[in-house]
Amino acid sequence: MREHPSIDVELDPEGRLVAIRWAGQREPVEVCNRWRIEEAWWRGPIARDYFKVVGRRWLALVYLDRVAGTWHLERLYD
Amino acid sequence: MPALTYAELHCHSNFSFLDGASAPDQLVERAVELGLSGLAVTDRGGLYGVVRFAAAAREAGLRPVLGVELELVDAAVPDPARVVVPARRPVRRGASGPADGRLPLDARRPTFGPRTGDSVFTLAGAQARPEEGLPARPRPARALLPGRRETVKEDLRGVGERQRGPQLVLLARDGAGYRSLCRLLSHANLAGTKRVPRVTHALLGQHTEGLVALSGGRQGEIARRLLVGDRAGAMAAAARLAELYGTGDGAATSGFFLELTHHLLPDDDWLVAETADLACGLGLPVVVTNDVRYARPEDRELYDVVTAIAHGRTLDGLADLRRPDGESYLKSVPELAAMPPGEAGLQVAHAAQPALARTWLEGIASAADLAGTCSVDLGFEQVRFPGFRVPAGETPFSHLVELCQAGARRRYHPLTPAVVRQLAHELDVIERTGLAEFFLICWDLMQFAKAQRIPAQGRGSAAGSIVAYVLGISRVEPIRHHLLFERFINEGRTTYPDVDIDFSSERREEVIQYIYRKYGPEHTGMVCNLVTYRARSAVREVGYALGFPRPLVDRVAKALETYDSVMVRRDLETDGGFAEFFQRPGEGPEAGAATLAGARGLGSVAASAALAAARGLVDPMGQLRHGGGKAPVPALLHGAGSKPAVRAGGTSDDEGGPGDTPASVDWLARQPATAIAVDPESGMPLSPERVTDRQGRTAHGDRSVPPAQPSQAQPRGGSTVGMSDWERWLEMCARIDGFPRHLSIHSGGMLVTAAPLIDIAPLERATMPGRVVVQFDKRDVETLKLIKLDLLGLGMLAAIDETVQLIESDCAVCLDLDRIPEEIPEVFRMLQAADTVGVFQVESRAQMQTLPKSRPATLDDLVVEVAIIRPGPIQGNAVHPYLRRRQGLEPVAYLHPSLEPVLKDSLGVILYQEQVMRIAIEVAGFTPAESDGFRRAMGSSRSSREMEKLHLKFVAGALRQPGMTGEMAEELFRQVAAFASFGFAKSHAAAFARTAYESSFLKLFYPAQLLVGLINAQPMGFYPVEVLVNDARRHGVAVLPIDVNASAWRTTTEWVGRPGWTMAGAIGDDGSHDGDPGEPIPDGAGITARPRPVRSGACVIPSAEPRDRYAAEGAMGWGVRLGLCLVKGIGEEHREILDAELSRGPYRTLPDVVDRTGLPEETLERLIRAGALDSLGRPRRELLWQLREVTGASRGRVDGRSTGRAGGGRRSAAAGRPLSLHLPATEAPLLPDISEPERIGDAYAVVGLDARRQVVALFRDALTRLGAVTNADLTGRRPGPVRIGGLVVTRQHPMTARGTVFLAVEDETGMVNVTLWPDTWARLRGVVRRHALLLIDGDLQLQGQVVNVIARSVVPLPDAVTAAGGPETPPGIRQQGYAGMRRL
């Protein structure tokens, strides 16, 4: 499986996700839903916090990889 | 706002049987750590864990809430679309996809699912109908056919939570609620199948008193309805349940609560909001629960493993059945409050309702409030006695006194003051402890057994009581044996006295039925037995779950010698075949260990990250503090996915075990042989590395002392992420250790209570049809202080009983075992010579090796013998001092003169628990009650503070003895503490020694009758039937072969006439006896000559004088006719017809046998091969030739099944002949006669023994040519190199001997012990595991009469004989010599 591209995020002082940056573009977003996945601890653990976010242009699914501490873009809804 | 408190109200322990990953005490411990105000354990479908949980919680000061999580089989309100109760279909094994080839479950088992489902016809219903597309068919009536077996177990593998019925949590608010739970579960269990109670809403409605219901989280009916958008249905269901359990105002009065559970799943925000909204709309209270399955976040891994085990899948194939989240752990108030619905987590638009946040926090608080209103007391002491009926005007105690007085007059002539004093003392204690009824119950039971002639005797600590003795409960006279009543009952004792009664194993069921009748089925139940994970089951199931290849898992499991799953690692590390798994590729062992330790130290990645977040009291979801992205140890994950390959080597066991690889052989060869020194005679370690721990207990080897390995020294727990697969496997095995896996019936624990049992414990079906067990095990029942009677089946009692009956019918002698003289020298001569095959308790290899040294000469010595050859004393090194003193090699010395009266029996060695107590009483000045507490404290690992207190008290008390010094007192304490951990109750040993003595007596004077008793009581004892038969034959007992015209189904005695040597008197000591053959052997006996007794040290034949005195005249004239049931394939179901046909008259021809017995063809073939049809007068090959033809002709079949006999109540196997043509069978061609080796080979293959000759006799000529000697001749030889040939009859690999293997090798003259040192075993294990007929070169060791051969080289005997030009071994014997065929 291809790696999900890394993204940068902006958080407000309370730690909420307010914007994402990807491919040189910044998109202020609002979170619609989020959930957590913890899986496959016996292979290579997957621990991710997913956020479904909506911005002006994008509806996107991003996640925080809690193992590596990095943010990724999993899916961009057109 | 006041500080929030929380109590978790929906939580599984591991008593949910593979649906929970933490033991109740782990949950309690964690709940206390988190500061919860209460905890409920709501196991799935049962109250299995409540006793332990309540005890643990009480000890920890936590409020326990008792409850259960039910799976309902119907919906609260109509559910036509089947969203609440999914149309579950059974999984057909091997089916390719879920859609095809499956039957609707309710067609097969009409009890599941709504029965009315068919009548509710809606569009949705039609769509959901699983039978769609199939032609309408009436329900099959097949289910009602006679002989149908009721479904006892249901296969729920592959059926996940979502496919099962909706859940509902019930909590008991008070005692009445607990009773309701018990009743509800009992009814549901009896209506359902094993482990799947059938709970309907109708049943719920019948038992609501004192119960509080919670809606059941995500899998509850309400949540399920909400999730599919059926809001109206959800409201109706909630209203219905609220109506059922009552509404109220607040936690104290409401009976129904909606559960709010948030596991960070995508729709949890929504579901919580909807549920809260619903509650608000209906005015129902809510509680927050976390639907807990394990105590700590990292336990999630074990939970996934047990889920995989439950479904028989691997972790990788479990995606649809596993919980996707890792949130089902116990959470604290801050953690919960910070969950998204709470204020701290407010972020997402649609959840951002202040009202929801308020409801969530209220739910947390009301969980604590609700827990605060629940209080159940599990004290059933008031209702424990079932009420024993005593004569009018009597109390139980006065009745007991009367019975004791009558009993004492019967037992004692004369009644000595000592007896009267002891009796008065015991009765006094019984009165004060209120246990009179208990004794009456036991007395009544023994009366019943006596009346029915069921052999029975009490054992264990009860045998120390004179009351038990005079009431006939035990057969051991306590005063003569210096037994201690306080070991049984004392006023300080908190647990219940334990009475174990052994019954003849064949007739125990009658006693059980009697108890059911006497106290009523509603007051009587069998205690369950909790089957927990042991080493082998853990390795297997965890291995499969982790996805290891089956051959590897099987191999590892087979290689285990330990039973303890925590010890799996140690065990496998010592097995060289797996050594490489303990190293990483390219790493030395140290480096591997270091990496591992590092990984553990840092802990897991995901789990510990979550935990760290939790500890920081932030919700990682609400406030993601990723900061600069501090990467937590991704480097450690390398190699985590590497799978060990299956080792090269054989694929089946016979190709060698896992250790049979060059690597392992090298490894074992490198082990210094001197590290393990084992006494060649006793098989006990000689120079143990004694380790004395803090409490002065001596441990031997490293079983009880954790070895200083990094892997073991690590604290258990933490995540397994970062471990190699192999390490993870071992770790999970250790973690799953002791987890309950399923229930079975306890071997004999019966619970009798005053209150109906159904109010005390839930009942459930056992696998045995018609049998009901309570959900509590032995330990729980003890904790609850209920009355439990242990009715155990003892094979030896059945054997002795049959022997006595045979003696009566054969010899017209009515033997009263209670009256046989206690000190017959001949009996002890036999015991001293270790001639003990078939003797109770002292027949094992280790016993045989010590008997010639300990030389028991009295019953008291025998008591010591029974108590001392046990793992405890062997490990504690108590055996050798005793044996040396016994042999006069070292003086009997006492630490202090005051010990002499206490330790005289055991020559100064502390051996019995009673001695420990007596030392405490007589030397250290404890009271009897205190001494029992002292014994138990020493025996279990109590806290060091308590130990220290007792230590000081003991030493202070001991110093009051004149002449006692401080050092002596300390040393005495050290010794007492060391031995208390494995001490044996003398009363128990005395009861067993009595039985051992009786069986010795019978073996000496009535060997034929005892042999019959022993064979018919199989399986029992240490040796297979073959050894018993060979041993009897060596003692001159004629064993007659199986013969359809003489053998009954069981083995019997048969008159063969007295042998010459019994009539001529004793056989000479030189082994000669005149050649007088004695009375002629009757025709048809099947043997031509009577076996001559073998003259060897281990074969004692009574001389004429004692025989005249103690045995009936003519007792030696009886032989043993082997029974037909020894032939494989002939079972209990053939007994009636075979015995009836035998009495009808002889069988004349093969068709006659075929017709009359109705046995299947393959069984008949075995009978022919066993020689059982030789009396038909035809050669065996001819019979075999004819067999197929004859069976084909006379066993017509109609429509593929036998036609059955008209009106046949009796299911005769002879039925099924449409017409008997009785055509003459085709003439057999001229076939060669069967040779003697072929005959023996067949006999061994079919029966496992030959009545005429031991198999090694066949090779005797060749063995003599090879220079081998007989086992009987070994005693006369000088120690040194020797060669023997024989058949391995037992192989032992005792943990106490640390790698040394012992073989019992038998030839036609006797048995000898062969020792393989660990290095020899490593070298030879391939041969020894594969072959049973061996030629052994070794060194003969002789110590007195103890013979031992230390093997140097071993080769298969048939190969050696062939090489020496001896007779070719026929296939039957080759196969028989193949160890894989034998259960070794």
Image (cartoon, grey):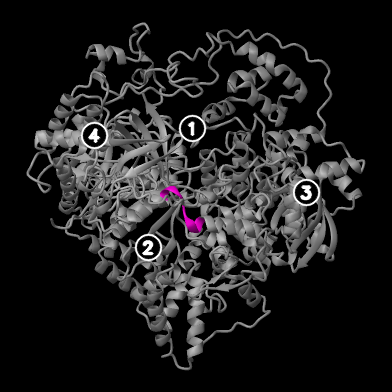
Does the magenta run of residues contain B153? no
**Mark 2 highlights which residue?**
B468
Between discs 1 and 4, the one toward the N terminus: 4
Q: Nearer the viewer, residue B1038 or A45?
A: A45
**Residue B915 locus on image (x, y percent):** 47, 75
Mark nearest the camera among 1 and 2 is 1
**Mark 4 highlights which residue?**
B271
Q: Secondary structure at mark 2?
A: helix
Q: Badge 1 local density, few (<14 within 10 Å), some, or many (20+)?
A: few
Left or right, residue A65 beside residue B1216: left
Marks 1 and 2 on same chain = yes
Query: Is residue B291 positioned above or below B440 on the image?
Result: above
Q: Count the marks.
A: 4
Between discs 2 and 3, the one toward the N terminus: 2
Mark nearest the camera among 2 and 4 is 4
Q: Kindly report the distance in space between the C-alpha atoms of the residues bearing marks 3 and 1.
A: 51 Å
